[in-house]
Amino acid sequence: MTAHLARRRSVVRGEAPWWLLPAMEDNLWEPVGAELSTLGCTGASVKNARDFTVTTLNNWGLDELTYDARLVVSELVTNAVRHAGEPTRLRLLHRASHVVCAVFDPEEQPPVVTDADYFAESGRGLRLVESLSCSWGWRLIEGHGKLVWAAFTTPFALHRDRTSA
């Protein structure tokens, strides 16, 4: 499975927000939203990323997303620390009806979803990301590592969908 994924430049699981993939394809990742650019490679990095996520979402009035987004960011940053050595930055974007959490790291090895043994103490992080987000994926950024992202539908969009049905 890993060899097959290594040849791919990106993977999307679920339906990505309409604006996300064209932005990555055209390399339009301008500073939109909020960014934490000094993560480091310690346990404190994960805590800083969680705190940054909660503060940013609260400032955007998206308190309802903080619990899930905080867990997902924790997993993405932990994976970057564990497998890539050091995440370079965390970017949170809010556009239209979605919030996207994106973690950049210098490693070009793609993330691999595994089926952890029942007694294993790790190996379930991407399953957690998959279950809490509406979509997630990764994209190799040639010569610069990769971006792993997860998208959430905003509560306002969910409310709008329920009232229009």
Image (spheres, rainbow, N blue to C red):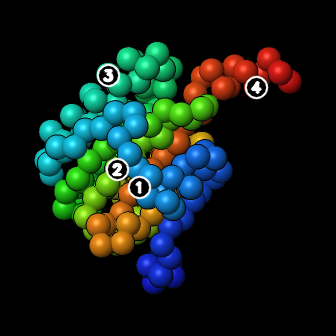
Q: As shown in the figure, which amino acid type bears the numbered disc 2?
A: Val
Q: Which residue is mark 1?
A: 148
Above or below, 17 relative to 79: above
Q: Earlier in the sequence, mark 3 or mark 2?
A: 3
Q: Say what secondary structure mark 3 lies in.
A: helix
Of the residues under marks 1 and 4, which one precedes in the sequence? 1
Please tell me which residue is depicted at 29% across the width and 67% down the height of the picture.
144
Report the Cα–Cα distance between label 1 and label 4.
Answer: 28 Å
| Image location of residue 163, percent across then percent down | 80, 17
Measured along the vertical axis of the image, is residue 85 above or below residue 58? below
Q: Is residue 158 visible?
A: yes
Q: Earlier in the sequence, mark 1 or mark 3?
A: 3
Q: Mark 4 highlights which residue?
A: 161
Neighbourhood count class around disc 4 (C-alpha, 10 Å): few under 14, some 14–19, many 20 upward: few
Q: Callout 1, which amino acid?
A: Val
Which residue shows up at 21% across the image and 34% down it? 48
- Counting residues from the start of the chain, the first of labels 4 and 3 encountered is 3
Quarter of the image for residue 98 reads top right
